[in-house]
Image (tube, rainbow, N blue to C red):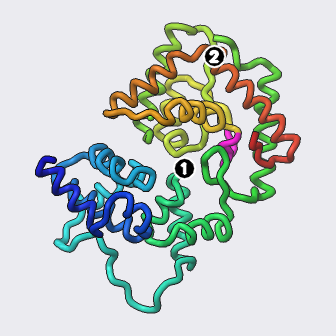
Amino acid sequence: MTSFELKLWRVIKLGGVTRSEERKMASSMDLRLKQRAVIEFLTAEGCSPIEIYSHMKAVYGEMCLDVSTVRLWTRRSREENSSESTVHDQARTGRPLSASDSKHQSRVDQLIRENRRVKQIEISIEIGISQERVHHITTNLLGYRKVSARWVPRMLTPQMRLQRVQICRELFAKFDEDEFLEQGNTVNSTKYVNTLEKLKARLRRVRSEKVSIIHHDNARPHTSLETRTALDRLGLRTLPHPPYSPDLAPSDFFLFPKLKDYLKGNRYETDEDGKNAVLSWGRDKTADFFADGIQQVVRRWRLCIERDGDYVEK
């Protein structure tokens, strides 16, 4: 073990237990403090967020924070100007707060809105309350449920249901008119625009005389002013997509689950190996494979209308 690895291991083993003991005994608070300490240490050593995540993933496994949270804490650590460590929460005055009070509810809601794929264990570690309390807040107090691996409101409001029905009817009408469906990476707005520009260049080469329509969900990179401006400039049309509707997004209910099944159980030594595996999987898929995903969303539009806007699980 190198001196660097030895120092890293000492930081990770703040509680003086083995990995197996740690996973059995450590509370969410312990994990939160330990993982923050690891991030602070490796940031000071000059490691990138991806390198930090790789080190932590090897130790904590499924209990590890996701890469977006690691990036957030890395940035916070770099921006910290005071000499006081950020590992421990700042002292608070006044009456102790309940783990289910409005402040914790607001924080949980904020984390879910920022990342609708966030896991309960990640929320627990981030805000320092038990996973049982997180489950109580998300499902009982905030009324969330998981649909296609994304947090959505458990009960859709009448307005949400009406909007889902209206958009599905509009999409279904376009499908009947044969206006589309002809044969033929955490992302920010800038990266997404770059992807759209590459797509447009490809479309000019292979189907320049045909109208191209983009179907994406309402993630912020897809709806930002930068993206909308680029779509207009590139002449790309988009389909409407109702909010809180991963069950109507082919990427969520069709593409990503199949990709996850393919990757499950495999271990990749480097990020590049993982990227190559994903690219290889995509290249091996035929046009019929992707057409099947589009045909499934058409069926889901119909079911959404028949169910008065309720979720379509399968």
Q: Give SS at disc 2.
A: loop
Residue at the image point whose x is 74% and y is 24% from the top: 295
- For label 1, the residue is 117
Residue range of the region highlighted in magenta in the rendering: 241-247
In the picture as drawn, the residue positioned furthest to the left comes out as 3
Residue 165 as seen in the image, left or right of residue 209: right
Report the front residue among 263 and 157.
263
In the picture as drawn, the residue positioned furthest to the right comes out as 306
Disc on res. 312: none
- For label 2, the residue is 211
Q: Is residue 7 depicted above or below 296 in this figure? A: below
Residue 121 percent location from the top left of the image: 49, 60
The residues tagged by marks 2 and 1 sit, at their Cα atoms, a distance apart of 33 Å
Q: Is residue 156 depicted above or below 245 in this figure? A: below
Q: Magenta stretch mostly in which secondary structure? A: loop
Q: Quadrant of the C terminus?
A: top right
Residue at the image point whose x is 73% and y is 31% from the top: 297
Residue 259 percent location from the top left of the image: 54, 31
Q: Is residue 138 depicted above or below 93 in this figure? A: above
Q: Is residue 243 magenta?
A: yes
Q: Is residue 66 magenta?
A: no
Residue 255 percent location from the top left of the image: 60, 31
Q: Quadrant of residue 39?
A: bottom left
CA neighbours of label 1 inside 10 A, class few (<14), some (14 to 19), many (20+): some
Residue 254 as seen in the image, left or right of residue 95: right
Q: As shown in the figure, which amino acid type bears the numbered disc 1? A: Arg
Residue 219 percent location from the top left of the image: 55, 44
Evaluate if marks 2 and 1 touch, with contact meaning CB atoms under 8 Å apart.
no
Sequence-earlier tag: 2 or 1: 1
Q: Which is in the foreground here, disc 2 or disc 1?
A: 1
Residue at the image point whose x is 77% and y is 35% from the top: 300
